[in-house]
Image: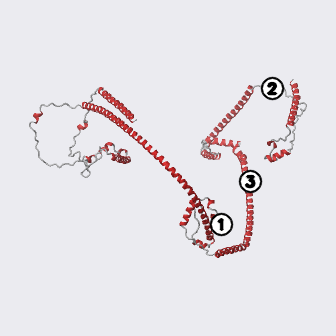
Amino acid sequence: MLFVQEKEVSLTSDISNEALKESLVANVKEKAARPKVQQRPRVSKRLQHVLKSKPAVKTKYFTSAEGVNEQNAVDMANEPSPFIYPGDLEEFAQKVMTKAWRNDIRIKELNLACSQRPSYKDRQRKGLLNRLYVKEPTVENIQTILDIDPDYFNTVEGRPIPNKLDMREYVDTVRACLRTKIITGYRKDDIMQIDENLMMEQKIIDAINRNYHTYVNTFEEFLYKDHTTAMKLLQESEQMAHESFKKAEELQWMSKMYGTLRSSIFNLEEKWRNCKTYQKFLYVTSPRIWRMSQKKFRRASVFLVEDDPDDEENIFGMYRLSVVEKGVSLTDIINTFKEELMDEVPPQLYFTEPQQLMDVFHFMEVQNLNSLIHTEELALPLEQVKNGMVEAVESFEAEIKTLQEVIDKLEGGICWEENRAKYLEEYAMRLVDNEFKSLMMDDEVLNLFVFVEDCYETRIAPNDANLSMLKMMKAIEERYRSELLVLDMVPSEQVALLEGSLYSEEMMVMKLAERAARQYAELERLTYSLNKAFEPPPERALVREPKNRSPPPGIPKPVVIPPRSLTENEKMHLEYFTEFCQYTESPSLYGIHISGEPEEVEKVKKEHESREVEVKDAVNPEKEKLKL
């Protein structure tokens, strides 16, 4: 598989190399076929540079600069070369540091203004004078003689002068040489790649042969080892069968011994449990001061829970059940014995004689009698406390009653205030709907508003601000007063002339209004007459409706059958097997009909329908006679 992949890679590389060679040859031929254009020689200097005055010659070298001396000059011999490629161990560190330096430089340049940011040329020129510094040599005034060989001009005479270098021809020659070198390099690369592929294939074949021989040898060795191990396993299996028989006999003997030991351990556990119970009993009955000073001799096994010594139910409950009833294993019992014996100390008992225990019991009886006497003495105070509680309850109930009365009074007052608020609200709505509405939307009020607004707009200004009628009347009043003041200043003859012209204008307007009213009335009469003329004639009935000379026979009313009463079985069914309520529900909801038998209802319906048909037949002949 590796050989095939390498072969595919070599084929793809050959194809790509051939395509690249063909493209390079085609580009060379295309450029050679292009016609050469003669370019005009460029003027090296402008006219202003030619005509301007020549600057004074400065005695200053290019390598010298202001502020650069031996202290701040850069010695290029000691500086690391930028063209040295780092080794394998230093490559990663060099890349990391280069990335960090570039990031710092980029951050510093971003803080500068756009016009102050350096370009790649500025970075190249940075520190140029410090790098090109050359110490100026000390010049001494030395007299020298120009020594020329007398045969120099004779030797040079007669030699041909070479032509000027053609840069275009030189560039073409260099390009052709470079193309030839590139093609030869590609061919050498192909040859080296083919040789390398052949070597790799031979190495793979050799490795396959070596692996084949190793696999054959290992397989033969595996067969030999497998045979030997199989024979050993057969021998070991026979030996293990013999030993297992011996172990089975030993197991039977050990099981018998285990049973005896188990029974003895259970007996010891029971005795130990009884002893601990006695010890705890004596510990509990001993005085409390002595118990506080002594360590609690209590069993701390894995299957017993720490209990409260003041709890009567747990004083002896932890030692009542046997180990067999609790289902504890022998390992737990043995471990418990070990744990208790490790920390076990000789038991210390408060009682040394049986009489001391009897004295304790006697003291407990005396304490019980004293407690009974004390409870009897507390009976009277308890009765007084009960009576006081009853009186407190009665007083509390009386307070509750008084508070309830106050609450009822407040509730009545609140209800009266709510009714009063509702009445005032209704009265206000009536005022708004009746009096206020009549005052605001009456015809006289609206006409007055229109008249005032018309007067305001004609004499003062348009009512764009939607002023109220009162404000417009005040404005008209102020305008009227100002007009009167102006009128007082006008001569009386002129006022009389203006008054006459005004009266004549008013009379003319009134005549025009009366004429328009008459024309409008005539128009209304004409429209009414035209509508009446063009309306179709009313349709008249051909036959008069017949009038009853005698009262018609009465239509019989439907007979309503009274509901029947429920039977005993129906009552029991509704009472015990349904949720029937005789006051709010009907028995028909539960499938019991009491409105009458279905057959009787059908008969009554048929009789009623037949009587209606007879009445209709009796009335129709009279109508037909009248029509005829």
| Percent coordinates x, y for residue 166 in the rendering | 23, 31
Q: For mark 2, what is the residue?
A: 540
Among all residues in the image, which is located at the extreme top? Answer: 628
Q: CA distance from mark 3 to mark 2?
A: 62 Å
Type of the residue with mark 3: Asn
Position of the N terminus by quadrant: top left
Lower sequence index among marks 3 and 2:
3
The residue tagged with tag 1: helix, strand or loop? loop
Residue 317 visible somewhere in the drawing: yes
Give the image location of residue 34, x and y in percent.
Answer: 30, 26
In percent of the image, x 61 and y 66: which residue is there? 271
Query: Which mark is in front, 3 or 2?
Result: 3
- Picture quadrant of residue 490: top right
In the rendered image, the vertical position of residue 397 relative to residue 517, given as above or below: below
The residue beneath circle 1 is 312
457 lies left or right of 228: right
Identify the element where label 2 is drawn.
loop
User: For residue 208, which quarter of the picture?
Assistant: top left
Looking at the rendered structure, the secondary structure element under dot 3 is: helix
Instruction: Using residue 296 as the reference point, say whether residue 28 is left or right of it.
Output: left
Q: Which residue is mark 3?
A: 419
The vertical placement of 298 against 238, above or below, is below
The three-letter code of the residue at mark 1 reads Glu
Name the front one of labels 1 and 3. 1
